[in-house]
Image: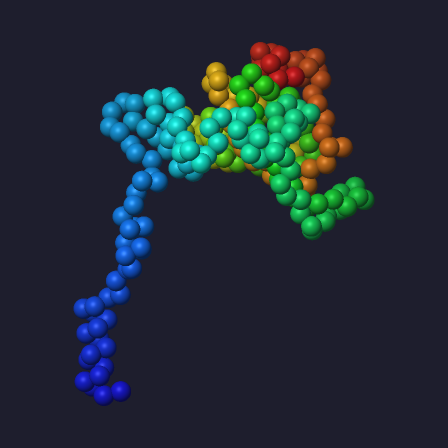
Amino acid sequence: MSRRHASAVVLLRRDAPPQPTRLARLALSDRSHLPRRSAGKDASRVSSRSLCVRDGGKTRYPPSVPHDAQDWIDALHLVPHPEGGHYRETYRAGLAVERDGQRRSASTAIYYLLRHGERSRLHRIRSDELWHFHAGDGLQVHVFDARGHAVLRLGLDLAAGEAPQQWVAAGAWFGAEVERPGGWALVGCTVAPGFEFADLEFADRDALLRAHPAHADVIARLA
């Protein structure tokens, strides 16, 4: 390549960068899909992966997003869960592992929806369980183990101590509830090694009360 041609290439790259198409410019300038924030004490805050906005304590959704718990139950084809709430299994790993001489999936996952006034009954399983927040209000997971009682807050309000993910160790007793009246929470639960209903054991209320008498109110609600 001649020096004159090389200089032309440099000039083109420096002075005439590729311009986005008209459609691309429109897409970049269109911010209507983003939640609007207002100033002041009741400013909106983003919830549920920017699909909804909490404004003054009320959650608003775009028209294409389910607006309440029953809409989500219908849209995701959820069914009642034996521990309370609604669920549907969405993933069961093809990879198998062995436990106590039996083969099982390495991991499983479900959608799980719980409404205020419902409970995820205190129970335990033989695997770690990871909880993921998807939509709605914050969810409280109560855990009882040898160290005592802990509350894991699942949600997007980090200032209130919530987190988008929480996990419960294998063998711990745990149950969940939604505190806000009229509220609900859509979450995901991932279990590894994979969940089997044969592993599900519900807590004995009296035994748990003897072990954790200081938390009788929580045990009475969830056991």
If the image is split into quadrants, where does the C terminus sit?
top right
Q: Which residue occupies the foreground of this view, 127 or 164?
A: 164
Write down the quadrant of residue 58 in the picture: top left
In this view of the protein, can residue 8 be seen by the observer?
yes
Q: Tell me if 110 is positioned left or right of 55 in this view.
A: right
Q: Tell me if 78 is positioned left or right of 32 in this view.
A: right
Q: Is residue 17 above or below residue 112?
A: below
In this view of the protein, can residue 141 be seen by the observer?
no
Q: Tell me if 151 is positioned left or right of 43 in this view.
A: right
**Residue appearing at x 21%, y 68% in the figure:** 16
- The outermost residue toward the bottom is 2
Q: Tell me if 136 is positioned left or right of 168 in this view.
A: left
If the image is split into quadrants, where does the N terminus sit?
bottom left
Model colouring: rainbow
Residue 35: percent from the left, percent from the top? 33, 35
| Count of numbered badges drawn on the protein | 0
Q: Which residue occupies the foreground of this view, 100 or 75?
A: 75
- The outermost residue toward the right is 101
Q: Which residue occupies the foreground of this view, 25 or 158?
A: 25
**Residue appearing at x 30%, y 43% in the figure:** 31
Residue 140: percent from the left, percent from the top? 52, 24
Residue 67: percent from the left, percent from the top? 46, 28
Q: Which residue occupies the foreground of this view, 147 or 38?
A: 38
Q: Is residue 3 above or below residue 191?
A: below
**Residue appearing at x 65%, y 13% in the figure:** 209
Write down the quadrant of residue 122 in the picture: top right
**Residue appearing at x 18%, y 68% in the figure:** 15
Residue 215: percent from the left, percent from the top? 58, 14
